[in-house]
Image (tube, helix red, strand yellow):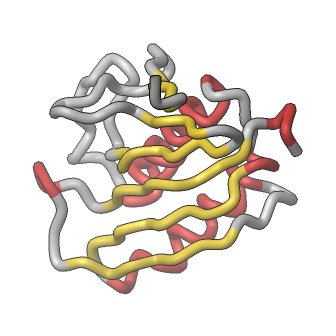
Amino acid sequence: MTGIERIETAGAPAPAGHYSQATVWRDLIWISGQLPKEPSGNPRPGVSFEDQARLALTNLLAIVAAGGGSADTVLKVTAYVVGIENWPAFNRVFAELFRDARPARAVVPVPELHHGYLVEVDGIAVRADRV
């Protein structure tokens, strides 16, 4: 037994490949990259950048919650953003959803993402009962 747990929640899209929504090792939740898809799996590439960012981050937070964490226990988020001009919009949505929580963060400008999406996020969190 490895002690690694896998997270699956209907609150975020099911993986489209050979990976888990997240894995948990001891106190840490490692969240896979989340695209702006509805939890049902419906794609949303045609909506505004802000709506895409909100949906991707909401998916990430749903997975964190399923693993026993919250926005306050997120340690690090990495965002892959198409177009450097979208950085300020990402920052606004991030602040809206994380409120007083201020995890470490990296925003990485990229030329394109799968299926024409404009943002993807992944992260690391701690289980709330371990903080």
**Residue located 55% across and 36% down the image:** 24
Direction from residue 37 to residue 4 in the image, left or right: right
Q: Reply above or below: 110 against 94.
A: below
Q: Nearer the viewer, residue 47 or 124?
A: 124
Q: Is residue 22 left or right of residue 14?
A: right
In the foreground, 90 or 48? 90
Q: Quadrant of the C terminus?
A: top right
The count of marks equals 0
Residue at image location 33% in from the left, 81% down from the top: 109
40 above or below 3? above
The quadrant where residue 120 appears? bottom left
Residue lying furthest front: 1
> Which residue is farthest bottom?
84
Left or right: 55 as drawn, with respect to 111: right
Q: Is residue 105 above or below residue 100?
A: below
Q: Position of residue 33 (x, y in %)?
A: 36, 50
Locate residue 6, reporting x and y percent.
45, 25
Q: Residue at x 25, y 78 (%)?
A: 110
Rendered location of residue 25, percent (x, y): 57, 39
Outermost left residue: 115
Q: Reply above or below: 91 against 101.
A: below
Residue at 47% from the left image edge and 36% from the top image edge: 23
The location of residue 37, given as percent across then percent down, is 32, 35
Q: Is residue 113 left or right of residue 5?
A: left
